[in-house]
Amino acid sequence: MSSSLSRSFLFVPASRPERFDKAAASGAHQVILDLEDAVAPADKETARGFIAQWMGRADAIVRVNGADSPFFIADMEMIRRAGVTKLMLPKAEPGALNRLVGLLEGQCDIIALIETVRGYAELRSIGKSGLVSQLAFGNLDFGIDAGVTETAQELDPVRLQIVLESRLAGLAPPIDGVTTSWTDPAAFGAAVGRTKALGFGAKLCIHPAQVKLVNEAFLPTADELDWARRVIQAAKDGQGAAVALDGKMIDAPVIRRAELILAGASGSAT
């Protein structure tokens, strides 16, 4: 499945191979085998071996260590040997991205994880570089780097800019960052709803319990589908003339929104 159609991206520690198959069966549209934050330095080499073994019978994104870390070169060697085709670059900045591409020679689709203020400042050059297929927001690390404590919507201006730069660069809609709690479905559902409203196309997950909620949140609601169908029918009945529905004018942007909702119902990954 193309990551551009994927809604849920589930992190799995690359040092825990007993979880790989479970993650793949969780309903997550993409599994991310994490070599960075989830793996202790002493376990990095063993984790690379687990990835190489599993890649022979399944597919996943690999989050490598940062380009400035002592583990980066060994990660790249494993990526080449194992035939990994999708990776996530943490703390993505132009210099790190160029270093990665120079080592891989175009082997992988790259998701650039925006986690630093410098990376945010270089969003346009990253998005338009022709080197990445998608942007993602590393909200936890970004908040630390920026000195911002995210309790609600403090980082939403950054999120919106990531969405706009993705659109400007012609990239797939970006992936929003993690929500650390999975024990409060209502609160998590509200967070994903805000993610969708801001224009993100997907969300990073840290627990399988989050996957189903993310997948469902990105599907149109019954009310949205009903509205969209009525808009399309009213436009057809109008045969190009101006028409109204529920006391509101139907014009080209309204019709386009209805078409996108219906497309989301038929084309969303489930």
Image: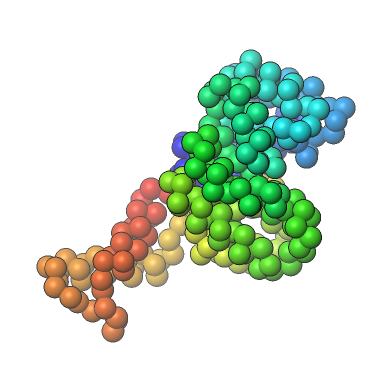
Q: How many marks can you see?
A: 0
Return the residue nearer the eye: 51 or 183.
51
Q: Is residue 61 above or below residue 231?
A: above
Residue name at image x 43 percent, y 46 percent? 170
Q: Is residue 217 above or below residue 205?
A: below
Q: Residue 68: percent from the left, percent from the top?
A: 76, 33
Residue name at image x 38 percent, y 48 percent? 267
191 sits left or right of 169 in the view: right
Q: Residue 27: percent from the left, percent from the top?
A: 56, 43
Q: Residue 65: percent from the left, percent from the top?
A: 73, 33
256 sits left or right of 74 in the view: left
Residue name at image x 61 percent, y 24 percent? 102
Q: How is the image coloured?
A: rainbow
Q: Quadrant of residue 113?
A: top right
Asked whether the viewer can see residue 55, the reply is: no
Q: Residue 86: percent from the left, percent from the top?
A: 57, 31
Residue extending farthest to the top is 81
Q: Quadrant of residue 97?
A: top right
Q: Is residue 195 above or below residue 37?
A: below
Residue extending farthest to the right is 42
Residue name at image x 26 percent, y 66 percent? 252
Asked whether the viewer can see residue 121, the reply is: yes
84 sits left or right of 3 in the view: right
Return the residue nearer the eye: 133 or 62.
133
Return the residue nearer the eye: 34 or 145.
145
Q: Quadrant of residue 135?
A: top right
